[in-house]
Image (cartoon, rainbow, N blue to C red):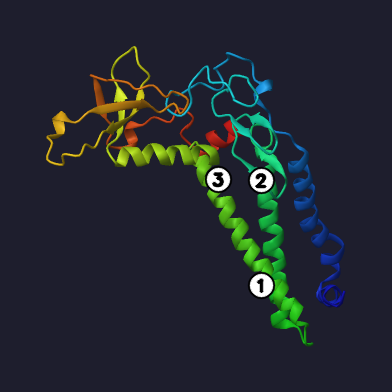
C-alpha cells in the first residue's frame, strides 16, 4: 500500500483518471480474450479438403491419423496433450493463458503480447522518471518495481519479436523445430529429393557403417527413409538429387511477405 500511495501521489491527475486505465485495461481484456478464445481443431476441418491446408509431402503427409483423436490430421495440425485435441495451424500451448495458440486465436494472442509490451514499457519509463525527479525519499520497493518492469518489457519484447520473426518465415513454433531437423540433415548431406514419380518426394539418406573402415564408399549399403515420421519403410532410390542449399527446399506455407503470412494466420 505504501508503494501504491507513493506512486499515486507522483502521478498527474490526467494520468490517474485517463492514461493509466487506458494502459492497464487492454492487457487484462486481451489476456482474458486470448484465454477463452478456442483455437480451431481438426474436427472443424472438412476431411479431405486440402485447399486451405495442402500437404507439402515434406513436413506433412496425407492419410495420417492422430493416434489419440483417431481422425485424419490436416496439414499444419498438432495434437496437444494438455488440451487433448488436435489444433489447426498449431503454434504452441501457452502456459500463461493456459490455451493452445492456433488457427482462430493468433490475433488475440499477438495483441495480448503487444499490449503487455506497451503497458510495461510505460510503467518502467514513468517509474524511472519518478525515481530520478522525486523530491522525497522513495521506498526501495519502487526501485525494485522499476527494475522488474524494465526486465519484463525486454523479455516480452524479445519473445514477441521471435514469434513474429517465425511468422515472417511462413512457419509456426511447432514447424520451426521440424524445419531445423530438415535443414540439419541437409547440412550433413543426408537430405535427398526423389526424381521417381511413384515415390514420396523427400528422404533421409542413411549409410550403414561397417566394421571395415577401409571399405570403399561405393560398396557401403545406403538406405532411404521418408521424411514422413509415420512411414517406417525402407526405400531404395535410383534417381535422386542430394539437397545442398536451403533454397532448394520449398516452403509452400510461406506467402512471401510478413503481412501475407500474418493475414493467413489470423
Q: Which residue in the structure is indicated by mark 2?
A: 94
Residue shown at 68%/46% (left/top)? 111
**In this picture, residue 72 sits left or right of residue 100:** left
Q: CA distance from mark 2 to mark 1?
A: 25 Å
Q: Residue 149 in the image: state x and y as whole percent.
A: 68, 67
**In this picture, residue 152 sits left or right of residue 230:** right
> Between 190 and 88, which is closer to the camera in this rendering?
190
Residue shown at 73%/42% (left/top)? 34
Circle 2: element type = strand
Residue 82 appears in which quarter of the rendering? Answer: top right
Q: Which residue in the structure is indicated by mark 1?
A: 147
Q: Who comes first in sequence, dot 3 or dot 2?
A: 2
Q: CA distance from mark 1 to mark 3?
A: 26 Å
Mark 2 Cα-neighbour bin, 10 Å: few <14, some 14–19, many ≥20: few
Quadrant in which the C terminus is drawn: top right
Q: Which residue in the structure is indicated by mark 3?
A: 164
Amino acid at each position: 500500500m505504501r508503494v501504491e500511495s507513493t506512486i499515486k501521489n507522483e502521478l498527474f491527475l490526467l494520468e490517474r483518471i485517463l492514461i493509466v486505465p487506458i494502459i492497464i485495461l487492454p492487457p487484462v481484456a486481451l489476456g482474458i480474450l486470448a484465454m477463452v478464445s478456442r483455437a480451431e481443431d481438426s474436427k472443424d476441418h472438412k476431411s479431405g479438403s486440402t485447399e486451405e491446408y495442402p500437404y507439402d509431402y515434406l513436413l506433412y503427409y496425407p492419410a495420417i491419423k492422430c493416434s489419440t483423436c483417431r481422425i485424419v490430421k490436416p496439414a499444419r495440425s498438432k495434437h496437444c496433450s494438455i488440451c487433448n485435441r488436435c489444433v489447426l495451424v498449431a503454434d504452441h500451448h501457452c502456459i500463461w493463458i493456459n490455451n493452445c495458440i492456433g488457427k482462430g486465436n493468433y490475433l488475440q494472442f499477438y495483441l495480448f503480447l503487444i499490449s503487455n509490451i506497451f503497458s510495461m514499457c510505460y510503467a518502467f519509463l514513468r517509474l524511472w522518471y519518478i525515481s530520478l525527479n522525486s523530491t522525497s525519499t522513495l521506498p526501495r520497493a519502487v526501485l525494485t518495481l522499476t527494475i522488474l518492469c524494465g526486465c519484463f518489457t525486454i523479455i516480452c519484447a524479445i519473445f514477441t519479436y521471435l514469434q513474429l520473426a517465425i511468422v515472417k518465415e511462413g512457419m509456426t513454433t511447432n514447424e520451426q523445430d521440424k524445419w531445423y531437423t530438415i535443414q540439419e540433415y541437409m547440412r550433413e548431406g543426408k537430405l535427398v529429393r526423389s526424381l521417381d514419380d511413384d515415390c514420396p518426394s523427400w528422404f533421409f539418406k542413411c549409410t550403414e557403417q561397417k566394421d571395415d573402415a577401409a571399405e570403399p564408399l561405393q560398396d557401403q549399403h545406403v538406405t532411404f527413409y521418408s521424411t514422413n515420421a509415420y512411414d517406417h519403410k525402407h526405400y531404395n532410390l535410383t534417381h535422386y538429387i542430394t539437397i545442398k542449399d536451403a533454397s532448394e527446399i520449398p516452403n509452400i506455407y510461406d506467402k512471401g511477405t510478413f503481412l501475407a503470412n500474418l493475414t493467413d494466420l489470423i
